[in-house]
Every structure is written in C-alpha cells, then in structure tokens.
Amino acid sequence: MAGRDFLHRLPDSELAFARRQAWLHKMHVDLPLLVLVLLVCGLGLVVLFSAVDGNPDRFSSQLTRLGLAFGVMLVVAQIPPRTLCRWSAPLYLLGLALLVAVLFIGVSAKGAQRWIDLPGLPRFQPAEIMKLVVPMMLAAFFAERRLPPRFGSVCVALLMLAAPALLIAMQPDLGTAILVSGSGLAIVLFAGVSWRLVLAAGVAALAALPALWVVLHDYQRQRVLTLFDPESDPLGAGWNIIQSKTAIGSGGLYGKGLLQGTQSHLDFLPESDTDFIIAVMGEETGFLGVMALLLLYFLLITRGLYIATRAPDAYSRLLAGSLSITFFIYVFVNVAMVSGLLPVVGVPLPLVSYGGTSALTLMAAFGMLMSIQTNPKMLRA
Amino acid sequence: MMDAFTLRDHDAEARLFTGRVIVLWFVVLMAMLVLVLRLFQLQILEHERHSVQSDANRIQVQPIAPTRGLIYDRNGILLAENIPVSSLTVVRERAGDLTATLETLEELVDLTPAEIESFQRRLRERRRPYEPVPLRLRLDEEEIARIAVNRYRLPGVEVEAQLIRHYPFGDLTAHAIGSIRRISPNDLQRLDRVQYSATRYVGRLGVERHYEDHLHGRVGYQRVETDARGRITRVLDRSPPVAGGSIQLHLDLNLQLAADAALGDRRGAIVAIDPATGGILALVSKPGYDPNLFIGGIDPASYAWLRDHPDTPMFNRALRGQYAPGSTFKPIVGLAGLAYGETDWEYTIRDPGYYRLPGQTRMYRDWSWRPGGGGHGIVGMQRAIYRSSNTYFYDLGVKLGIERLAPFAAEFGFGRRQVVDLPDAVAGLMPTPEWKRAARREPWYPGDTVNLGIGQGDMLATPLQLAAATAIIAARGERHPPRMLLAADAELPELNQGTLPPLELSDQQDWKRMAEAMADVVHRGNRGYGQNGTAWAHIGMDIPYRMAGKSGTAQVVGIPQGLRHDDLELTERQQRHAWFVAFAPVDEPEIALAVLVENGGGGSSVAGPVAREVMDAWLLRRSMEGPAVARH
C-alpha cells in the first residue's frame, strides 16, 4: 500500500514515466539502451542514405534488415540469462563444428571462404555467430569457477578462445578474428586474471610481433606498410586511406552537408557505404557530426558496462562486460582504420555500415544485455 | 576452512569485477579520446590541406579545342570543313590494366591489329599527361551503344564526340589546299602550348599550313568536376573557344575539276593563274591522294603504299617538282635579248639545224636536226618563237651572256621563291657561275650558256614558276606573285602584300609583240611545211578565242653527239617531259597556265591539248554563263 501511496504522490508526467518503466521492465527492455540504439540507428540511416547516393533499393533493404535485427533484439531480451548459460556449451560446439565445415564446404566471396549455404536456411557466416557464442562460452566457463581464476583455468579458457579465432583467421577474416579474440580476452580480464600475468602476456605478444609479420598474407603486410606511408602507393594500396583521410579532413568542423560530399559522391572514396562510411559522415557532417556519433557509442558502451556491474551473478556480469567491450572494439578498430591509425581490416561501423549480418549479431548482443538488466534473479552455478 | 575453500565469496567477486570494469571503462574512455584527437587533427588542424586536396581531386581545368576555320573556293564552295565523329579514346593514366581493357574493348568493337599498333605507338610517344589517346576514329551507333553499356568495365575509356577536318573533294584538292596532320612530338616543341593544349591537328601542307594561325582559332577552357574515373560530372564554369577564321581562295573548283580531267591518268601538274592578281585558279598535281586518310591515323600498310608507290602520289609536282623548262623558257630569253638590245624584231640568222660556239666543234642541235640537214632557214625572233628554233636562242643566249640572262630570268621568279602563301613551293634553280663554283666546284663554260638559251642544262623550274612567269608576260610585265588567298574574315596581311614593281622593257611594245609571236605558236596555220606554229596542228585549228602559247620538251637523258632523240631506245621513265605554257585571250589575258606531263613526249602534241582543255573550261564556260554569275 505504501508503494501505491508513493505513486499517487508523484506528478502526473512522472507517474506515467514510472508506469512505463515498469511496463518496459516487464517486457525486458532497458530504456536507456533502447534509446541509444535507436539514436545510433537513426543517425546511421541518415548517413547511409547519403552514402548509397539516395539509392532507394539499398536504403530500404538496410531499413528492413535493421527492423529485423531490432525484432531479434526484443526476442533475445526475453531469454533469461540462465537459459543463455545453459545453451553456451552446446552452441559453442556447434559453432566450432560449423567453422570447421566452412573450411571444407564453405562458399567463397571476394577471395575468402566465409559463408555456409545449407538447404532450407539462409546463407550465413558461422564466424559472425561466434562473436556471441565465444563470450557466452567463456562466461559460462568462468562462472563455474572461483574467481579470480587459477592459471590453469586461464590457459584452458585461452585454448577455447584460440580454436575459433584461428579458424576464423584462416578463412581469412582478420576483422572478425580480432573481434572474437577481443571478446574472449575481455572476459579473461573481467574474470580477474592478475595484472602481472596480463603484463607478462603483453610483453610476450610484443616479442612475437616479428613472427606475426612472417605469418601475415602479402596483402595484409601491404596494408600495414601502407598505414605508415600511404603516399608510397597512392593509386594502389594507399588509395583508400588517402581518400578517406581527405574526405574526413575536408569536412572540417561542420561538414559539406548531407549528399554534398564530393569525395564519396564522385567515387573517390571506396567502400563508402560499408567499412568506410565514417569517412562519408566526417565529410558531410563534419567534426561535430562524428563527435555526436562517438558520444552515442561511448554512452552505449558505458551503459553496457553499467549493466554488467549491476548484474546479479558471474555469468551475466562477464557476458555483459564482454559484449560491451566487443562493441567498443568494433567502434575503435573501424574509426581508427578509416582515419589512418590502424591498418585496413574488415570491421564495419556498428549499426551504421551497410550490411545485415553484423547488425543482427549486434542487436542480439543488445538483447542479451537487456535480458541481463531485467532479470534480477540469481543464477545457481 | 573447507567451507572457505569451496564456498564462493560473491561479494568479493562482484567487487573484483567492478574494479575491472572501472579499469576497462577508463581504457575505453582513453581510446575514445584518441579517436577524438585524431579526428580533431584531421578535421580541424589539417582541414585546410585536406580541403585543398579534395578540390584538387575533383576539379580540373580542361582546355577546349576551337573549331578550325573553313576553306572556300572562289565561288563559295566548301573545300575543307569539319564533320562530327564519335571516336574511341583511352586515358592511359586512368585505364589501370591496359591489356585487360583492350581485351574487353576487342569484344565490343572490331579493332584491327593496325589500329592497336598505331595506338600503342602513340602511347609510347611523348604526350601531355591525361591526354586521351585515340584508338579508333568514327565509331558507328551500335559500337557506341555497346561501349556505353560496358562502361563500368572500361576505366579510362571514353567515346568522344568531336569535329574532325574533312575534305569533301578528297584527292581532287589535296595538293591545292594542303592538309592537316596529327600534332607530332616535334610540333609540340614549336607550337604555343596554351593555344594548342586541346588541339590534335595542325596544318602541315599548303594553305592549311600557311594560314594555320588564322584557321586555328583561340583555345577555350572549362573547369569541370570529375569523378574518380575522370568522367565529367559537372561543368563549373566555361570560357568558350573562339572558332578559327575562314578563308576564301582564288581556286575555282570547276576549273580544278576540268584541269584534273584534262590531265587524266597521266603524271603531271597544271597551274592556272589569273594574271591580273596572281590568284591561283587551279593547281593540280597527279596522281593525288585522299588527305582524309591521314586524319584519324592512316594504317601503316596504306601509308607505305602511298609512300613507296613509284608514281609518288604524295609528291606535289606543281609546287615541288623541278624540271628543265625547255623551250618554254625561250620567250624569256627573247625578252632579255630585246631588253638588252642584243636583238630586235628585224634581226635574222640562218638556222642550219645546229649551233657551234666559235672555234669549237661541238654541235648544239636544233630539234629539227637530222644528219646532213634540218634547220628552219632564215629565222627572226617571231619565227624563232613559233617554230621554236633552238639555234636562234643558242645564239641569243651566248650574246646575252649568263651575267645578263640569269638576273633577268630571276625577275620572272626563276630560282626564287616568289610566292605569297604557298609554303611548300620550292625555288627551282637558275644557274649562275657563282652557283656552279659553289655547288660543282667547276667554272662556268660558254657551253652552259648555250644550253641555258633553250632552258636546258642545269636550270630547273616548277610548274608553278612557269605559270607565274607566263602570267607576267600575259600581264605585260606587271608582277603579281602567285597567291591562294582571295578573301578572309579578317584583315590578313597576305591580302595586300606581294605585288612587285612591274618589269620595264626598253620598248614596252615588245610585251605585245612577244604575245603575238606566242599566239602564232597556236594560231599560225595553213602556211605549208615548216611555216605553221608548232602547236597549231594539235590545238589551234578550231580554237574560238585567241591564245598565246609555247610548248616545251625537257630531256630526261642526254643525247650523244650525232644521234637523234628518236634513235634512242628509252624506257617510259626516260621519255622527255612535255611542257606547255599559255595565256588567253591574247589581248586581255584572263588566265595564264603551265602544263607539265611527266615523260609525256612532245610539248605541243601532249601538253598542248591539255592546256587547251583547261583554257576552254575557263573561257568558254564563263562566257556562256556570263562572268557575273560565275564570279563570287
């Protein structure tokens, strides 16, 4: 009854808000996350409209995909974390099997074998699913153990991470491999592995860099070299990076205006509606536009991490933290690559770049975050 | 303690986790700051530089070629025009993988190996960057459509609509008006780089070359926005080119046609001049060639054929062919003798059919010489002209001496480039002792003067020079050097330049008397053996107007002493060249001309009828139509 009184004392508008909050909670929707996702998608669609040159087919197809992905988010939000936890190991094994299958029966596109085409199912990339399944698996793995984990557990976890990461890198799909590895390493950090170990691993990784150079494909090495000196090959490998820097830089503070970007609309900028879409945004909406988008991203990541700290059990915490950090890696790698800070790897700008698969997994991840935020019940390990 | 080992401390784990989240959130914050700083650097600090780069990417200044001026004949008939064609070009800098592009193109358009070869050759030549290199001129509609559909596979490939030079009368006017050729690397060094930045062709021969500056026009430019493939998406501003000026020539296409027909398939040349102005009414050199073949690139096989053909179709005989003038030179020698008082109209010699220098045995023969006979009997100036007596002019030449004959002949244009706007014309050769010492390292012998008296020996003249000299006789000493230009849409200096002071003889009546003597060549007939003009039997019997003429026969090979020309067994190419010079009507000449038929044989019999045909075309048709109609 006291609760009722409290409600009665609220002004009308706040009362309505509180009621809606309660209703949204019951629907397993986190309002701040929802608002931020919608804002990013909205801003993204505006930029994409310009990037596809007002092409109604491409624009509406992206709209449809985002709508579908949005539905997936709401559905996934209904799945309680404990169910996710239970599915983790089977999904992981299935995903691993599919990755192996891709090596043998995968369908090639653009020089990489990434797709699997099973009768009765739409074509999909198993690697994409691993962006969700690997964090789920590792979260479940650590949730069963006392934290901080012992060294042996960490080693086992790293092996569980390395298997899919290497399989994905072999396709080759360096971008996804980086994202999957990042999500796994984030969980290891969140689980509480000692900083000394992290430091040692970091030093070891640095020492291993020359070895990595040997392993890289020629085109990947070229991309690294190009990063340091794009002018060395202005019409070849350096073209993308020169043109995208020019596009972003020429936007200035306010930008050239939507649909006014000459770099993108005159085709100087390659991949302008997919991986390099931030360059279109930089050119047309300027520094202010990009800042607005980065702020939204930062708030999304912060909200995700906040949800992680409020989660009632280890599995939810680790999963929420990992998904948030994965999202961050998406943003950072994409923007850093397009602005010439990192070599070119195929990582799209989340929720903005044209393309359906990544939108689906990203939205599913937000669904999981919502589920974690709206399911206060403790899990029993 | 067992409990402590097995139980999990959930609060501690949550605290540990929260600590880790704070650390990682901070890492995220820093990383995002790095991105912000990077964007700040690009968009704020380096904005200016990138902005300039972005404009440089998209904006290009493109020159626009002016439309070349037109060339008309005296009646306003178009002799050189510009017609639109669609041509296939490739910008090498944008083409990427050229081999692949060419392979794709070959699927769409039938490219001949010759076209690809000349394309490759042009690629290797020095050229302006981003200059489209032509691959095929004149695409048909279907080919244009096929290329348009496949454009995305063909970076750097363009279908260009352009105007190209076209000579509607092809080989008929080729040698008369000249032609343009594709600008070569050599031309680029000579031409104004700015004015010719968009132009692909330049006048190479004839009036196309002489009036290049007038015909070319002034270049325009446009600032355009282009996409990454170099295709124009927008024109930002434009300064239109100024089209070249047009010119009208003295040339009369109808007369040109008649002259061309009169010469037929024979090798030779005809130049017809209006004595009152020096204007060239017809200029024919045969065989000719189609200058349109050279525009857009002639294939090497056709070019080799033209170049190596024994009849040298690309050689302009009218302007550059140098031949001994033979007997056509006799009126000049006669006028020199009269001018210097070495002879008069009453003075006669006895012509035995040969001439000997005093104290020498060498025999200089007349054309009528035969062993033990020949000659024209008692010969004065008039008879020496209409019978074409060599002996008279051998004698007169020796009396004059080279030091008086050579300068006098030079006043008629021999050995000089006495022309207004015919850049390809050559000077011929008027031999002098100085020339002989320099060129041959030999002294001048009296015998050289003897030969010169009948236009043989070392002397060389072009058909143009003989026509011009004949025009001077026709105009009674007034001198209007040959010219092509009649009118233009600008005050060109050539319109008012070139007239020389008239030649004065000691007795100006001698011009008329010489014209009458030359009229006898054509008209004096029915007088019995050895009394008729040399050309009368061939052209003079039914001529409806009065025409003055002089035949000439230029030996190609020397004839040994004691033999007659007819005794030699000569190949076709060793046959004598036939000349005929003429003007008409005798009293008020409207046309003067020179006809050369290479290896044609007798001047009167071969070249004479050709000259008559051209005269008829000019005088009879005009009198039928009435001068006001035919005149522009």
Image (cartoon, coloured by chain):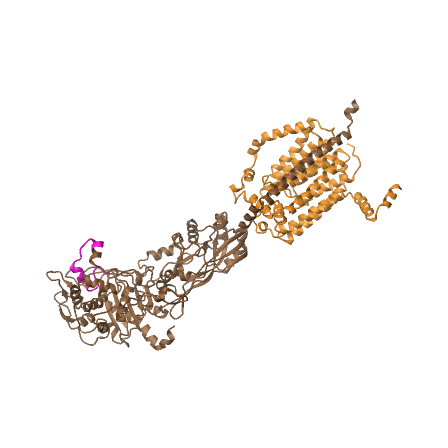
Chain colours: A orange, B brown
Residue A107 visible in rendering: no
Q: Left or right: A20 with respect to B537?
A: right
Residue A189 visible in rendering: yes
Q: Is residue B76 above or below residue A256?
A: below
Asked where in the image residue A242 lies, by quadrant, the reply is top right
Chain part drawn in magenta: B437-459
Residue at x 40% of width, y 53% of height: B188
Asked where in the image residue A328 lies, by quadrant, the reply is top right
Q: Left or right: B16 with respect to B571?
A: right
Coordinates of residue A313 in the picture (x, y in percent): 77, 34
Coordinates of residue A353 in the picture (x, y in percent): 64, 46
Q: Which quadrant is the C terminus of chain B positioned in?
A: bottom left
Residue in the foreground of this view, choosing between B169 and B37:
B37
User: Residue extending furthest left?
Assistant: B359
Q: Left or right: A252 with respect to A366?
A: left
Q: Is residue B451 magenta?
A: yes
Residue in the foreground of this view, choosing between B278 and B95:
B278
Coordinates of residue B341 in the picture (x, y in percent): 17, 68
